[in-house]
Image (spheres, rainbow, N blue to C red):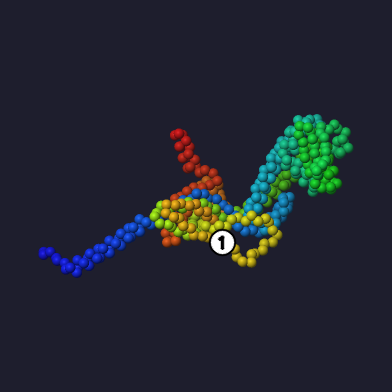
Amino acid sequence: MPARTFSFKEVVITALVSLVISGIGGALFNEYLSRAKPSTSLISVAFKGPSGLIEVPPDLRTAAEKARWKPIQRYVSFTELLKDREEILERIAQLQEGIDLTSMWLEESKKAMNRSILTGDELQVTPFMKTNVVPDTLVTLFHFRDYSPPPHSMVQLRSLPSMAAISEGNQALDIDFGFSGIHMPEDTQEREYLRALHLLAESLSRGDRQNIAHYHQLFSQDAELQLRSLQRLEQLLRQLLVPRARLDIDAFVSNTGRSAVVIKPFFALVIDHPDFKGRPFILSTSKFAPSLLTGKDVDIAPLLPESSATPYFSVDPGQSKTVHLVGAYPLGDDAIKIVQIYGTGLLNCKIVGFTESGDTVTSSLSSFGAQINSSDKKTIEDQGRKM
């Protein structure tokens, strides 16, 4: 077959086409090499409250009153209510400790009722002297006049020798045993309260076993009621706060490419759990913070809407940055389940970001929780044995 010959025109056109194609190919190749290469990873997963005030339902405010807790106003910040709950849990623990100590002491005291007077050493180990919750509760009962008088009167007590000096001043009643002392408030001039307080002081200073046992029984009865009321109040607070919590996440975004990348302000958190399959949680770069406002009886809307900017951000070539993300919506009914999973240390999740050009950036799956998960614990233990 004879060789085909090409005209000068064909050769020129072919050369030009080849030049164009190679130029385009080179440009595309250079563009590929210089492209942005973003990646992301999760640093922490936690929870935070909303930025505004929360309306406290009437039953919760009534429960606070019944529990003799400080008044809770109608509109309160998430932060303030969270602090209230922590203080309530602390008070519950104190009451439980006082109840347990009192129960044991009263049982032991029954065995020594033939000795009507407590020695100084015996007085020091009473719950009244070992924990503040006993005297604090009795003082409250005196203020409310919600108590029964002890077996022995002031006249009967003063016939007994005293182990302490009792003094008044600076709105306080002090009982000084020399080796220790008791300080109780005289913050009112109400005669009934002062009479009850002085009778308690004289009972302690003279070590009157029957009176002291009576006061401990008063504490125990009231503490049991208060404990149940505070537990109910804590439950109502938890039911109010948990559904209003939002995800609070820190992520690390890197760019190993040769050009900057712009990341959209919205991300998705994907939780690896059957209950949340196909249900990503929307996050944003919103800068809102929980409100630090104190409670109010009314909530007034602003004249103009406040900005809730969710800014885009860029990552320069070879750079990295930490990004703070917040749940775009309250967790609602999902909150309890997520918190439970978080508590086991098995909250497995990943984060997905989106570039301005429409690409997705997905992290690897990571585990987070209030405690170390079994897999990580085993890895650490195995490595520790090799060291």
x 67%, y 47%: residue? 87
Is 250 or 216 nearer to us in this picture?
Answer: 250
x 69%, y 61%: residue? 298
Residue 291 x, y percent position in the rendering: 62, 56
Quarter occupied by the N terminus: bottom left
x 47%, y 54%: residue? 351
Is 81 or 275 nearer to us in this picture?
Answer: 81
- Number of marks in the rendered image: 1
Residue 265 x, y percent position in the rendering: 50, 59
Residue 115 appears in the rendering: yes
Q: Is residue 125 left or right of residue 32?
A: right
Q: Is residue 104 above or below residue 137?
A: above
Residue 107 appears in the rendering: no
Residue 303, by quadrant, is bottom right
Question: Residue farthest to the left?
Answer: 2
Residue 66 x, y percent position in the rendering: 73, 52
**Does dot 1 land on a helix, a strand or a loop?**
loop
Is 311 or 347 nearer to us in this picture?
Answer: 311
Q: Is residue 198 left or right of residue 319?
A: right
State the residue position of label 1: 308
Residue 195, by quadrant, is top right
Circle 1 residues within 10 Å: few <14, some 14–19, many ≥20? few
Quarter occupied by the C terminus: top left
x 47%, y 60%: residue? 264
Q: Is residue 278 above or below residue 109?
A: below
Residue type highlighted by circle 1:
Ser
